[in-house]
């Protein structure tokens, strides 16, 4: 199996949308915005992205109950391409683990 593993920390920017598939699997969709300073080639650079997240299954649904717009979280999972209604492809992070970031750090 080839490696497909991503850890991304950021702020929830769009409201959570909950949906249950025809097979009974609960899904929660939201958008995470990441902003940071990274080092590349010995120089600091600004990194920014907006990543759609999908959290599927009953276990992850219990974690999403604590997430609201503005929550700071870390999502661990794998990325896959989803085709939008407009026919354009976008990368989506499929959550396997969600952690709230303690603002008291």
Image (cartoon, helix red, strand yellow):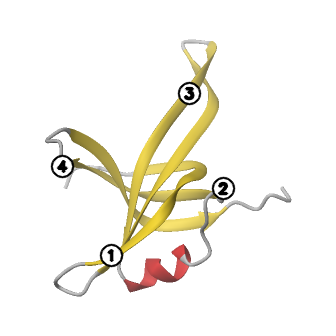
| Mark 3 or 1, closer to the camera | 1
Q: Earlier in the sequence, mark 2 or mark 4?
A: 2
Query: CB atoms at circles 3 and 1 under 8 Å apart?
Result: no
Q: Earlier in the sequence, mark 2 or mark 3?
A: 3
Indicate which disc, 1 or 4, sits on the residue closer to the N terminus. Answer: 1
Question: Where does the image place residue 32, in percent across and percent down from the top left?
Answer: 51, 50
Q: Check the picture and name the quadrant holding the C terminus.
A: bottom right
Relative image position of residue 98 (x, y in whole percent): 53, 66
Q: Write down the residue under mark 4.
A: 85
Q: Nearer the viewer, mark 2 or mark 3?
A: 2
The structure residue drawn at horizontal position 21% and vertical position 48%, both measured from the top left corner, is 84
Q: Secondary structure at mark 1?
A: strand
Asked if residue 46 is positioned above or below residue 80 in the image, the reply reads above
Find the distance from the CA under tag 2 to the CA under tag 3: 19 Å
Q: Is residue 27 left or right of residue 47?
A: left
Disc 2, disc 4: CB below 8 Å? Answer: no
Please tell me which residue is depicted at 63% across the width and 33% down the height of the picture.
36
Horizontally, residue 65 falls left or right of residue 50, namely right
Q: Disc 1, disc 2: CB below 8 Å?
A: no
Query: In the rendered structure, which disc, 4 or 3, sits on the residue that comes first in sequence?
Result: 3
Identify residue for label 2: 70
Disc 3 to disc 1, how far (Cα)? 31 Å
Query: Where in the figure is residue 69, as x and y percent of width and height?
Result: 61, 59
Residue named by callout 3: 47
Q: Secondary structure at mark 3?
A: strand
Give the quadrant of the N terminus: bottom left
Q: Which of the 4 image quadrants contains residue 21?
A: bottom left
Query: Marks 4/3: CA distance?
Result: 28 Å
Q: Nearer the viewer, mark 4 or mark 3?
A: 4
Q: Residues within 10 Å of mark 4 (few under 14, many from 20)?
A: few
Which comes sooner in the sequence, label 3 or label 1? 1
**Residue carrying label 1:** 19
């Amino acid at each position: 199996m080839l490696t497909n593993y991503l850890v991304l920390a950021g702020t929830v920017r769009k409201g959570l949308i909950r949906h249950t598939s025809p097979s009974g699997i609960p899904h929660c969709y939201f958008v995470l915005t990441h902003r940071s300073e990274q080092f590349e080639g010995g120089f600091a650079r600004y990194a920014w992205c907006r990543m759609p997240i999908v959290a599927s299954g009953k276990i992850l649904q219990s974690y999403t109950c604590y997430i609201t717009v503005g929550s700071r979280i870390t999502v661990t999972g794998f990325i896959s391409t989803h085709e939008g209604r407009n026919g354009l492809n976008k990368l989506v992070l499929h959550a396997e683990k969600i952690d709230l970031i303690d603002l008291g750090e």
